[in-house]
Image: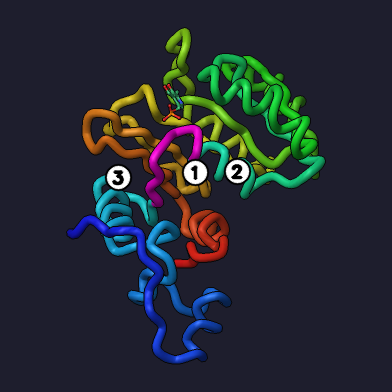
Amino acid sequence: MSIEAFATLIVMEPETKHRLFSGELGPVKDFFIYSPHFNLTMLNLSLQMATLEGIEAAYCTLSGMFVISLVLMQLCSSGDHVVASQTLYGGTHALLTHFFPRACSITTSFVDLRDYDTVKVTIMEGRTKVLYFEVVSNPTLTVADVLELCRIAHDKGLTAVVDNTFAPMCTLPRTSYGTVFTTPRFEDYSEYTEVFDGWDEAEKLLSMKGLVL
Ligand SMILES: Cc1ncc(COP(=O)(O)O)c(C=O)c1O
């Protein structure tokens, strides 16, 4: 596995460029456009992370807030709503409280995720797109029932987005509910990983330009 320098990759056939930008060709078929978008190092790391976690796909970024912003902006559009835990990392709380309502009209209701009835009634049909929580919260170390919350999200047609920063790797459960885990690995990899549990979600999230699997 090499370390990739910033590079724009050469495409020999003009037709290939069109197929790259339309998403027909991409990293898993060994086609790369621009190394900061995707490169062999990132592809290999992502594949190895997915194998280690036992899930369908992973995508690596350089910071936790980057991946959290990326996932939420991919899943939510203007006017959409998020139901989130009332105990969240300060950066995520600020993103949901200040930035999203002002910049994108995405609003959030903060609830006690141990109270499942409140979670269910706070979900607005058609508007709420994400149930967001941390496996072990920062601060207060509240432990979430990941499977139960993912099941509620799935039953209500939402995507559960789960920040796994404070929990060890072995606690990452398989939910089969199309869950997205954001999993910083300070000690293990010095990297941040966005982990997808459910191939549909992985494809949806990676279908951004340049990130098509
Ligand atoms: C629970 C949690 N989520 C997300 C983050 C954000 O990570 P980063 O500082 O890499 O943006 C942190 C950072 O400490 C965190 O504790």
Q: Is residue 127 above or below residue 148?
A: below
- Between 99 and 167, the residue placed more toward the observer is 99
Q: Of the residues shown, which amino acid type is indicated by label 1? A: Val
Q: Identify the residue position indicated by label 2 in the image.
A: 159
As helix, strand or loop, the secondary structure at mark 1 comes to: strand
Residue at 66% x, 27% y is: 96
Residue at 52% x, 49% y is: 178
**Furthest residue toward left:** 1
Cβ–Cβ under 8 Å for marks 1 and 3: no
Coloring basis for residues: rainbow
Q: Position of residue 163 (x, y in %)?
A: 46, 31
Q: Is residue 93 above or below residue 190?
A: above
Cβ–Cβ under 8 Å for marks 2 and 1: yes
Q: Which residues are magenta?
A: 59-66
Q: Find the distance from the CA under tag 2 to the CA under tag 1.
A: 7 Å
Q: Of the residues shown, which amino acid type is indicated by label 3? A: Glu
Q: Position of residue 10 (x, y in %)?
A: 38, 79
Q: Which mark is residue 53?
A: 3
Q: Identify the residue position indicated by label 1 in the image.
A: 180
Q: Of the residues shown, which amino acid type is indicated by label 2? A: Thr
Q: Find the distance from the CA under tag 3 to the CA under tag 2.
A: 19 Å
- Quadrant containing the N terminus is bottom left
Q: Is residue 193 above or below residue 44?
A: above
Cβ of mark 2 under 8 A from ligand 1: no
Answer whether residue 154 is visible to the viewer in this image: no
Q: Find the distance from the CA under tag 1 to the CA under tag 3.
A: 12 Å
